Amino acid sequence: MAEDKAQEKRSWFWNFVDNIQGDKVILIIITVLIMFSIVAIFSSTSLLANAEVSRLDIFKEQMVTVLAGIAIIAVCYMIPRIWVFRVLSQFGFIISAAILALLHTPLGVEVNGAVRAIQLGPVQVHAYEVTKVAMIMYLAWAVHAYKNDSFRIAGWLSSRFRSLAFLARPGWKRFIYIFAPILIVCVGILFGSFSSTVFIGGIMFITILIGGIKIRDILPIVFLGIAAAGVCIGIYFISGHKVFGRFATAFSRMTMGEKHEDIKGLRPGTIEFQDALDAIKQPASAKIAIHEGGLLGKGPGNSTQKYTVPLMFSDYMFSFIIEEYGLIGGIVVIMLYVSLLARASLIVRACDNEFAKTAVAGLAVLISGQALMHMFINADLGPLTGQTLPMISHGKSSFFAFSIAFGVLLSISKMAKAKIRKEEEESEPLVEGVGIQDENVEATLSELDEFESGKE
Protein backbone atom coordinates (compact mmCIF):
# COMPACT_ATOMS: atom_id res chain seq x y z
CA MET A 1 0.00 0.00 0.00
CA ALA A 2 2.78 2.41 0.94
CA GLU A 3 4.52 1.77 -2.38
CA ASP A 4 1.27 2.34 -4.29
CA LYS A 5 0.71 5.65 -2.50
CA ALA A 6 4.27 6.74 -3.19
CA GLN A 7 3.85 5.79 -6.85
CA GLU A 8 0.58 7.69 -6.99
CA LYS A 9 2.24 10.79 -5.49
CA ARG A 10 5.08 10.55 -7.97
CA SER A 11 2.63 10.19 -10.82
CA TRP A 12 0.70 13.27 -9.64
CA PHE A 13 3.89 15.31 -9.45
CA TRP A 14 5.17 14.28 -12.87
CA ASN A 15 1.72 14.78 -14.38
CA PHE A 16 1.75 18.31 -12.95
CA VAL A 17 5.19 18.93 -14.44
CA ASP A 18 4.14 17.51 -17.82
CA ASN A 19 1.07 19.77 -17.90
CA ILE A 20 3.25 22.86 -17.66
CA GLN A 21 3.35 23.98 -21.29
CA GLY A 22 5.88 26.80 -20.92
CA ASP A 23 9.61 26.28 -21.47
CA LYS A 24 10.66 23.98 -18.64
CA VAL A 25 14.30 25.04 -18.78
CA ILE A 26 13.30 28.62 -18.02
CA LEU A 27 11.08 27.30 -15.23
CA ILE A 28 14.06 25.45 -13.74
CA ILE A 29 16.20 28.60 -14.02
CA ILE A 30 13.56 30.62 -12.16
CA THR A 31 13.30 27.97 -9.43
CA VAL A 32 17.06 27.82 -8.83
CA LEU A 33 17.41 31.62 -8.81
CA ILE A 34 14.62 31.89 -6.23
CA MET A 35 16.29 29.23 -4.08
CA PHE A 36 19.56 31.17 -4.23
CA SER A 37 17.64 34.31 -3.28
CA ILE A 38 16.01 32.82 -0.20
CA VAL A 39 19.24 31.35 1.18
CA ALA A 40 21.47 34.29 0.27
CA ILE A 41 19.13 36.98 1.61
CA PHE A 42 18.79 35.21 4.95
CA SER A 43 22.55 34.94 5.30
CA SER A 44 23.65 38.32 3.89
CA THR A 45 21.29 40.80 5.56
CA SER A 46 23.04 41.07 8.94
CA LEU A 47 23.34 44.86 8.59
CA LEU A 48 19.57 45.17 8.06
CA ALA A 49 18.84 43.44 11.36
CA ASN A 50 18.53 45.55 14.52
CA ALA A 51 16.85 45.55 17.93
CA GLU A 52 13.40 45.83 16.32
CA VAL A 53 13.89 43.67 13.22
CA SER A 54 15.55 40.26 13.44
CA ARG A 55 17.05 38.24 10.62
CA LEU A 56 14.08 35.90 10.96
CA ASP A 57 11.76 38.83 10.26
CA ILE A 58 13.82 39.66 7.17
CA PHE A 59 13.60 36.03 6.08
CA LYS A 60 9.81 36.03 6.50
CA GLU A 61 9.59 39.25 4.51
CA GLN A 62 11.65 37.70 1.72
CA MET A 63 9.41 34.61 1.69
CA VAL A 64 6.34 36.85 1.29
CA THR A 65 8.13 38.66 -1.56
CA VAL A 66 8.99 35.34 -3.22
CA LEU A 67 5.42 34.04 -2.95
CA ALA A 68 4.07 37.30 -4.39
CA GLY A 69 6.61 37.07 -7.23
CA ILE A 70 5.56 33.48 -7.97
CA ALA A 71 1.94 34.64 -8.08
CA ILE A 72 2.88 37.36 -10.58
CA ILE A 73 4.69 34.80 -12.75
CA ALA A 74 1.64 32.50 -12.60
CA VAL A 75 -0.76 35.30 -13.61
CA CYS A 76 1.40 36.24 -16.59
CA TYR A 77 1.79 32.57 -17.54
CA MET A 78 -1.98 32.01 -17.59
CA ILE A 79 -2.64 34.84 -20.07
CA PRO A 80 -3.96 32.88 -23.08
CA ARG A 81 -3.41 35.27 -26.01
CA ILE A 82 -0.42 37.30 -27.20
CA TRP A 83 -2.66 40.27 -28.06
CA VAL A 84 -3.27 40.82 -24.32
CA PHE A 85 0.45 41.52 -23.80
CA ARG A 86 0.52 43.64 -26.94
CA VAL A 87 -2.37 45.83 -25.80
CA LEU A 88 -0.99 46.28 -22.29
CA SER A 89 2.49 47.05 -23.64
CA GLN A 90 1.19 50.20 -25.36
CA PHE A 91 1.03 51.82 -21.92
CA GLY A 92 4.65 50.97 -21.02
CA PHE A 93 5.99 54.40 -21.97
CA ILE A 94 3.15 56.25 -20.23
CA ILE A 95 3.76 54.25 -17.04
CA SER A 96 7.51 54.87 -17.22
CA ALA A 97 7.14 58.60 -17.86
CA ALA A 98 4.57 58.96 -15.07
CA ILE A 99 6.75 57.18 -12.50
CA LEU A 100 9.83 59.21 -13.47
CA ALA A 101 7.81 62.43 -13.24
CA LEU A 102 6.52 61.48 -9.77
CA LEU A 103 10.11 61.35 -8.54
CA HIS A 104 10.08 65.17 -8.67
CA THR A 105 6.98 65.45 -6.47
CA PRO A 106 6.59 65.05 -2.69
CA LEU A 107 6.11 61.32 -3.38
CA GLY A 108 9.79 61.02 -4.36
CA VAL A 109 11.97 59.11 -1.88
CA GLU A 110 15.76 59.26 -1.65
CA VAL A 111 17.56 55.94 -2.05
CA ASN A 112 21.36 55.70 -1.81
CA GLY A 113 21.89 59.45 -2.16
CA ALA A 114 19.40 60.12 -4.99
CA VAL A 115 15.63 60.26 -5.46
CA ARG A 116 14.92 56.96 -7.20
CA ALA A 117 11.67 55.69 -5.64
CA ILE A 118 8.14 56.88 -5.02
CA GLN A 119 6.14 56.25 -1.86
CA LEU A 120 2.59 55.05 -2.56
CA GLY A 121 1.13 54.57 0.90
CA PRO A 122 2.99 51.70 2.57
CA VAL A 123 4.55 50.64 -0.73
CA GLN A 124 7.85 52.01 -2.04
CA VAL A 125 8.30 51.60 -5.80
CA HIS A 126 11.79 51.90 -7.28
CA ALA A 127 11.19 53.77 -10.52
CA TYR A 128 14.07 52.38 -12.58
CA GLU A 129 13.18 48.74 -11.90
CA VAL A 130 9.67 49.25 -13.26
CA THR A 131 10.91 51.38 -16.17
CA LYS A 132 13.30 48.68 -17.41
CA VAL A 133 10.62 46.06 -18.02
CA ALA A 134 7.87 48.51 -19.02
CA MET A 135 10.01 50.11 -21.75
CA ILE A 136 11.15 46.77 -23.18
CA MET A 137 7.52 45.73 -23.57
CA TYR A 138 6.57 49.13 -25.00
CA LEU A 139 9.37 49.03 -27.58
CA ALA A 140 8.34 45.52 -28.59
CA TRP A 141 4.87 46.91 -29.32
CA ALA A 142 6.23 50.02 -31.06
CA VAL A 143 8.55 48.04 -33.36
CA HIS A 144 5.71 45.65 -34.23
CA ALA A 145 3.33 48.55 -34.94
CA TYR A 146 5.98 50.34 -37.03
CA LYS A 147 6.60 47.28 -39.21
CA ASN A 148 2.87 46.75 -39.68
CA ASP A 149 2.16 50.49 -40.13
CA SER A 150 -0.52 50.35 -37.43
CA PHE A 151 0.04 53.61 -35.53
CA ARG A 152 -3.61 54.64 -35.46
CA ILE A 153 -3.27 58.05 -33.83
CA ALA A 154 -0.56 59.20 -36.25
CA GLY A 155 -2.57 57.86 -39.19
CA TRP A 156 -5.76 59.59 -38.06
CA LEU A 157 -4.05 62.93 -37.42
CA SER A 158 -2.19 62.89 -40.74
CA SER A 159 -5.40 62.17 -42.69
CA ARG A 160 -7.57 64.62 -40.73
CA PHE A 161 -5.26 67.65 -40.63
CA ARG A 162 -3.27 68.73 -43.67
CA SER A 163 -0.66 70.48 -41.52
CA LEU A 164 0.09 67.14 -39.83
CA ALA A 165 0.45 65.15 -43.05
CA PHE A 166 4.14 64.65 -42.23
CA LEU A 167 3.11 62.23 -39.47
CA ALA A 168 2.39 59.64 -42.15
CA ARG A 169 6.10 59.45 -43.05
CA PRO A 170 8.00 56.44 -41.66
CA GLY A 171 10.82 58.61 -40.32
CA TRP A 172 8.48 60.70 -38.19
CA LYS A 173 6.70 57.61 -36.92
CA ARG A 174 10.03 56.10 -35.86
CA PHE A 175 10.97 59.30 -34.04
CA ILE A 176 7.64 59.90 -32.30
CA TYR A 177 6.89 56.32 -31.24
CA ILE A 178 10.35 54.82 -30.77
CA PHE A 179 13.22 57.29 -30.51
CA ALA A 180 11.50 60.12 -28.59
CA PRO A 181 10.27 57.80 -25.79
CA ILE A 182 13.79 56.39 -25.42
CA LEU A 183 15.31 59.88 -25.13
CA ILE A 184 12.64 61.08 -22.71
CA VAL A 185 13.10 58.09 -20.42
CA CYS A 186 16.89 58.41 -20.51
CA VAL A 187 16.73 62.09 -19.51
CA GLY A 188 14.27 61.22 -16.74
CA ILE A 189 16.61 58.57 -15.34
CA LEU A 190 19.64 60.86 -15.68
CA PHE A 191 18.38 63.03 -12.80
CA GLY A 192 18.96 60.13 -10.41
CA SER A 193 21.59 57.85 -11.92
CA PHE A 194 24.10 58.26 -14.74
CA SER A 195 25.02 54.55 -14.79
CA SER A 196 21.38 53.45 -14.93
CA THR A 197 20.83 55.86 -17.82
CA VAL A 198 23.67 54.29 -19.80
CA PHE A 199 22.61 50.73 -18.98
CA ILE A 200 18.86 51.07 -19.56
CA GLY A 201 19.40 53.24 -22.64
CA GLY A 202 21.79 50.64 -24.05
CA ILE A 203 19.30 47.81 -23.44
CA MET A 204 16.55 49.80 -25.17
CA PHE A 205 18.70 50.39 -28.26
CA ILE A 206 19.68 46.71 -28.37
CA THR A 207 15.99 45.81 -28.18
CA ILE A 208 15.00 47.91 -31.20
CA LEU A 209 18.02 46.58 -33.12
CA ILE A 210 16.85 43.04 -32.41
CA GLY A 211 13.35 44.10 -33.44
CA GLY A 212 14.63 45.02 -36.89
CA ILE A 213 15.17 48.78 -36.80
CA LYS A 214 18.12 49.40 -39.12
CA ILE A 215 21.38 50.84 -37.85
CA ARG A 216 21.33 53.63 -40.43
CA ASP A 217 17.96 54.74 -39.01
CA ILE A 218 19.32 54.65 -35.45
CA LEU A 219 22.56 56.57 -36.04
CA PRO A 220 20.91 60.03 -36.23
CA ILE A 221 19.21 59.48 -32.89
CA VAL A 222 22.48 58.24 -31.38
CA PHE A 223 24.13 61.53 -32.35
CA LEU A 224 21.11 63.38 -30.95
CA GLY A 225 21.47 61.42 -27.70
CA ILE A 226 25.16 62.31 -27.47
CA ALA A 227 24.28 65.97 -28.05
CA ALA A 228 21.58 65.78 -25.36
CA ALA A 229 24.12 64.26 -22.95
CA GLY A 230 26.50 67.13 -23.71
CA VAL A 231 23.76 69.64 -22.96
CA CYS A 232 22.99 67.90 -19.65
CA ILE A 233 26.67 68.00 -18.67
CA GLY A 234 26.76 71.70 -19.56
CA ILE A 235 23.70 72.33 -17.38
CA TYR A 236 25.41 70.40 -14.56
CA PHE A 237 28.45 72.73 -14.60
CA ILE A 238 26.46 75.94 -15.20
CA SER A 239 24.13 75.18 -12.27
CA GLY A 240 27.06 74.74 -9.92
CA HIS A 241 26.66 70.95 -9.82
CA LYS A 242 23.06 71.23 -8.57
CA VAL A 243 21.13 69.99 -11.63
CA PHE A 244 21.96 66.45 -12.80
CA GLY A 245 24.04 66.04 -9.63
CA ARG A 246 24.63 62.36 -10.30
CA PHE A 247 27.34 63.35 -12.76
CA ALA A 248 29.52 64.02 -9.71
CA THR A 249 29.01 60.43 -8.54
CA ALA A 250 29.77 59.13 -12.03
CA PHE A 251 33.01 61.10 -12.24
CA SER A 252 33.96 59.89 -8.76
CA ARG A 253 33.41 56.24 -9.67
CA MET A 254 35.34 56.60 -12.90
CA THR A 255 38.38 57.75 -10.87
CA MET A 256 38.05 54.96 -8.30
CA GLY A 257 41.32 53.43 -9.53
CA GLU A 258 43.16 56.64 -8.71
CA LYS A 259 41.72 56.56 -5.20
CA HIS A 260 43.11 53.06 -4.72
CA GLU A 261 46.54 54.46 -5.58
CA ASP A 262 46.14 57.59 -3.46
CA ILE A 263 45.53 55.63 -0.27
CA LYS A 264 48.90 53.97 -0.53
CA GLY A 265 50.61 57.28 0.22
CA LEU A 266 48.59 58.00 3.36
CA ARG A 267 49.53 57.04 6.92
CA PRO A 268 47.12 54.54 8.56
CA GLY A 269 45.18 56.01 11.46
CA THR A 270 44.89 59.52 10.07
CA ILE A 271 41.60 61.19 9.13
CA GLU A 272 42.73 61.41 5.50
CA PHE A 273 43.48 57.69 5.44
CA GLN A 274 40.06 56.84 6.93
CA ASP A 275 38.22 59.07 4.44
CA ALA A 276 40.12 57.50 1.53
CA LEU A 277 39.40 54.03 2.93
CA ASP A 278 35.67 54.73 3.21
CA ALA A 279 35.62 55.82 -0.44
CA ILE A 280 36.95 52.45 -1.66
CA LYS A 281 35.64 50.19 1.10
CA GLN A 282 32.79 48.56 -0.80
CA PRO A 283 34.61 47.55 -4.01
CA ALA A 284 37.71 46.55 -2.03
CA SER A 285 35.67 44.39 0.37
CA ALA A 286 33.89 42.77 -2.60
CA LYS A 287 37.26 41.76 -4.06
CA ILE A 288 38.31 40.41 -0.65
CA ALA A 289 35.10 38.35 -0.52
CA ILE A 290 35.84 36.82 -3.94
CA HIS A 291 39.44 36.09 -2.93
CA GLU A 292 38.47 34.47 0.37
CA GLY A 293 35.75 32.37 -1.22
CA GLY A 294 38.26 30.30 -3.17
CA LEU A 295 37.01 27.22 -4.98
CA LEU A 296 34.50 25.81 -2.49
CA GLY A 297 33.69 28.87 -0.34
CA LYS A 298 33.40 29.32 3.40
CA GLY A 299 30.00 27.69 3.62
CA PRO A 300 26.50 29.12 4.22
CA GLY A 301 26.42 31.78 6.92
CA ASN A 302 30.20 32.08 7.24
CA SER A 303 30.74 35.29 5.24
CA THR A 304 32.74 37.99 7.01
CA GLN A 305 32.61 40.78 4.42
CA LYS A 306 28.84 41.14 4.86
CA TYR A 307 29.65 42.96 8.11
CA THR A 308 31.73 45.61 6.32
CA VAL A 309 29.81 46.15 3.06
CA PRO A 310 26.49 48.00 3.67
CA LEU A 311 24.99 46.87 0.34
CA MET A 312 26.34 43.31 0.22
CA PHE A 313 22.78 41.93 -0.04
CA SER A 314 22.05 44.19 -3.04
CA ASP A 315 24.87 45.65 -5.14
CA TYR A 316 27.46 42.99 -4.16
CA MET A 317 25.39 39.82 -3.99
CA PHE A 318 27.60 37.95 -6.47
CA SER A 319 30.69 38.60 -4.32
CA PHE A 320 28.78 37.28 -1.32
CA ILE A 321 27.76 34.13 -3.21
CA ILE A 322 31.37 33.41 -4.15
CA GLU A 323 32.57 34.03 -0.58
CA GLU A 324 30.10 31.52 0.85
CA TYR A 325 29.76 29.04 -2.05
CA GLY A 326 33.07 29.51 -3.81
CA LEU A 327 33.93 29.71 -7.48
CA ILE A 328 31.72 26.68 -8.12
CA GLY A 329 28.66 28.51 -6.78
CA GLY A 330 29.56 31.55 -8.88
CA ILE A 331 29.85 29.42 -12.03
CA VAL A 332 26.44 27.87 -11.35
CA VAL A 333 24.89 31.35 -11.16
CA ILE A 334 26.65 32.44 -14.36
CA MET A 335 25.40 29.32 -16.16
CA LEU A 336 21.81 30.09 -15.13
CA TYR A 337 21.82 33.50 -16.81
CA VAL A 338 23.71 32.30 -19.88
CA SER A 339 21.26 29.38 -20.21
CA LEU A 340 18.38 31.85 -20.04
CA LEU A 341 19.85 33.75 -22.98
CA ALA A 342 20.29 30.52 -24.93
CA ARG A 343 16.74 29.32 -24.26
CA ALA A 344 15.33 32.72 -25.20
CA SER A 345 17.06 32.48 -28.58
CA LEU A 346 15.27 29.17 -29.19
CA ILE A 347 11.92 30.67 -28.21
CA VAL A 348 12.51 33.59 -30.60
CA ARG A 349 13.05 31.13 -33.45
CA ALA A 350 9.74 29.46 -32.64
CA CYS A 351 7.82 32.78 -32.70
CA ASP A 352 6.31 34.06 -35.94
CA ASN A 353 5.17 37.35 -34.38
CA GLU A 354 7.43 40.41 -34.35
CA PHE A 355 6.08 41.60 -31.02
CA ALA A 356 6.73 38.24 -29.36
CA LYS A 357 10.23 37.97 -30.83
CA THR A 358 11.25 41.45 -29.73
CA ALA A 359 9.72 41.10 -26.27
CA VAL A 360 11.40 37.74 -25.56
CA ALA A 361 14.78 38.85 -26.89
CA GLY A 362 14.64 42.23 -25.11
CA LEU A 363 13.66 40.76 -21.74
CA ALA A 364 16.30 38.02 -21.96
CA VAL A 365 19.01 40.57 -22.85
CA LEU A 366 17.85 42.79 -19.96
CA ILE A 367 18.00 39.99 -17.37
CA SER A 368 21.25 38.43 -18.58
CA GLY A 369 22.87 41.79 -19.33
CA GLN A 370 22.12 43.16 -15.88
CA ALA A 371 23.39 39.96 -14.26
CA LEU A 372 26.66 40.05 -16.20
CA MET A 373 27.15 43.75 -15.45
CA HIS A 374 26.57 43.06 -11.75
CA MET A 375 29.23 40.34 -11.89
CA PHE A 376 31.74 42.55 -13.73
CA ILE A 377 31.33 45.31 -11.14
CA ASN A 378 31.72 42.84 -8.28
CA ALA A 379 34.97 41.66 -9.85
CA ASP A 380 36.09 45.33 -10.09
CA LEU A 381 36.07 45.25 -13.89
CA GLY A 382 34.17 48.52 -14.16
CA PRO A 383 32.78 51.46 -12.15
CA LEU A 384 30.04 50.79 -9.60
CA THR A 385 26.58 51.02 -11.19
CA GLY A 386 24.25 49.84 -8.44
CA GLN A 387 22.65 47.16 -10.65
CA THR A 388 21.24 44.26 -8.65
CA LEU A 389 21.54 40.54 -9.43
CA PRO A 390 18.14 39.69 -11.00
CA MET A 391 15.83 37.53 -8.84
CA ILE A 392 18.55 37.08 -6.19
CA SER A 393 19.46 40.49 -4.71
CA HIS A 394 17.33 42.05 -2.00
CA GLY A 395 14.61 44.41 -3.21
CA LYS A 396 10.86 44.00 -3.74
CA SER A 397 10.50 46.27 -6.77
CA SER A 398 13.32 44.52 -8.60
CA PHE A 399 11.99 41.06 -7.73
CA PHE A 400 8.45 41.90 -8.85
CA ALA A 401 9.61 43.58 -12.08
CA PHE A 402 11.73 40.59 -13.06
CA SER A 403 8.89 38.26 -12.04
CA ILE A 404 6.79 39.98 -14.71
CA ALA A 405 9.64 39.52 -17.19
CA PHE A 406 9.95 35.80 -16.44
CA GLY A 407 6.18 35.38 -16.52
CA VAL A 408 6.05 36.93 -20.00
CA LEU A 409 8.88 34.64 -21.18
CA LEU A 410 7.06 31.56 -19.91
CA SER A 411 3.74 32.65 -21.38
CA ILE A 412 5.12 33.43 -24.83
CA SER A 413 7.09 30.15 -24.86
CA LYS A 414 3.83 28.35 -24.06
CA MET A 415 2.02 30.10 -26.92
CA ALA A 416 4.88 29.40 -29.35
CA LYS A 417 4.87 25.69 -28.53
CA ALA A 418 1.08 25.49 -28.79
CA LYS A 419 1.13 27.15 -32.21
CA ILE A 420 3.85 24.81 -33.49
CA ARG A 421 1.88 21.80 -32.22
CA LYS A 422 -1.31 23.05 -33.88
CA GLU A 423 0.43 23.69 -37.19
CA GLU A 424 1.92 20.19 -37.14
CA GLU A 425 -1.51 18.68 -36.55
CA GLU A 426 -3.18 20.75 -39.27
CA SER A 427 -0.38 20.55 -41.83
CA GLU A 428 -1.11 18.93 -45.19
CA PRO A 429 0.92 15.84 -46.16
CA LEU A 430 3.94 16.48 -48.39
CA VAL A 431 2.67 13.89 -50.89
CA GLU A 432 -0.99 13.72 -51.74
CA GLY A 433 -2.62 10.63 -50.30
CA VAL A 434 0.19 10.01 -47.81
CA GLY A 435 -0.12 11.41 -44.31
CA ILE A 436 -0.16 10.52 -40.66
CA GLN A 437 -3.96 10.21 -40.34
CA ASP A 438 -5.33 6.75 -39.57
CA GLU A 439 -7.54 6.65 -42.69
CA ASN A 440 -4.53 7.43 -44.91
CA VAL A 441 -2.53 4.65 -43.31
CA GLU A 442 -5.40 2.13 -43.74
CA ALA A 443 -5.93 3.11 -47.38
CA THR A 444 -2.24 2.73 -48.16
CA LEU A 445 -2.10 -0.70 -46.53
CA SER A 446 -5.18 -1.84 -48.49
CA GLU A 447 -3.59 -0.77 -51.78
CA LEU A 448 -0.44 -2.67 -50.85
CA ASP A 449 -2.48 -5.83 -50.15
CA GLU A 450 -4.22 -5.59 -53.53
CA PHE A 451 -0.93 -5.11 -55.33
CA GLU A 452 0.69 -8.15 -53.69
CA SER A 453 -2.33 -10.40 -54.35
CA GLY A 454 -2.27 -9.49 -58.04
CA LYS A 455 -5.73 -7.94 -58.08
CA GLU A 456 -4.47 -4.88 -59.95
Image (cartoon, rainbow, N blue to C red):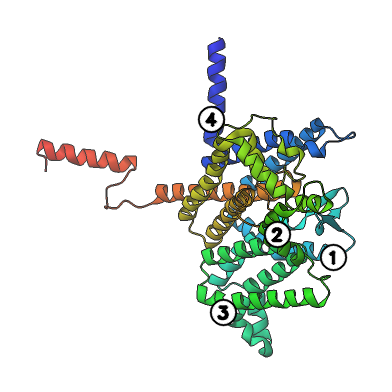
Between tags 2 and 1, which lies in front? 2
- Which quadrant would residue 449 be assigned to in this image? top left
Q: Residue at x 60, y 51 (%)?
A: 376
Point out the tag, 2 or 1, that comes first from the N-terminus.
Answer: 1
Q: Find disc 1 in the rendering and name its residue.
A: 104
How crowded pointer 1 is (Cα within 10 Å; few <14, some 14-19, many 20+) is rated as some
Q: Looking at numbered disc 4 in the image, what kind of residue is underneath it?
A: Asn
Q: Looking at numbered disc 2 in the image, what kind of residue is underneath it?
A: Arg
Q: Judge whether residue 174 can be spotted in this image.
A: no
Q: What quarter of the picture does the C terminus occupy?
A: top left
The reply to whether dot 4 and dot 1 touch (C-beta < 8 Å) is no
Point out the tag, 3 or 4, that comes first from the N-terminus.
Answer: 4
Q: Find disc 3 in the rendering and name its residue.
A: 170
Between tags 2 and 4, which lies in front? 2
* Outermost left residue: 454
Q: Residue at x 58, y 35 (%)?
A: 294
Between tags 3 and 2, which lies in front? 2
Left or right: residue 433 compared with residue 283: left
Point out the tag, 2 or 4, that comes first from the N-terminus.
Answer: 4
Q: Find disc 2 in the rendering and name its residue.
A: 253
How crowded pointer 2 is (Cα within 10 Å; few <14, some 14-19, many 20+) is rated as some
Left or right: residue 115 compared with residue 446: right
Q: Looking at numbered disc 3 in the image, what kind of residue is underneath it?
A: Pro
Between tags 4 and 1, which lies in front? 1
Q: Residue at x 77, y 44 (%)?
A: 310
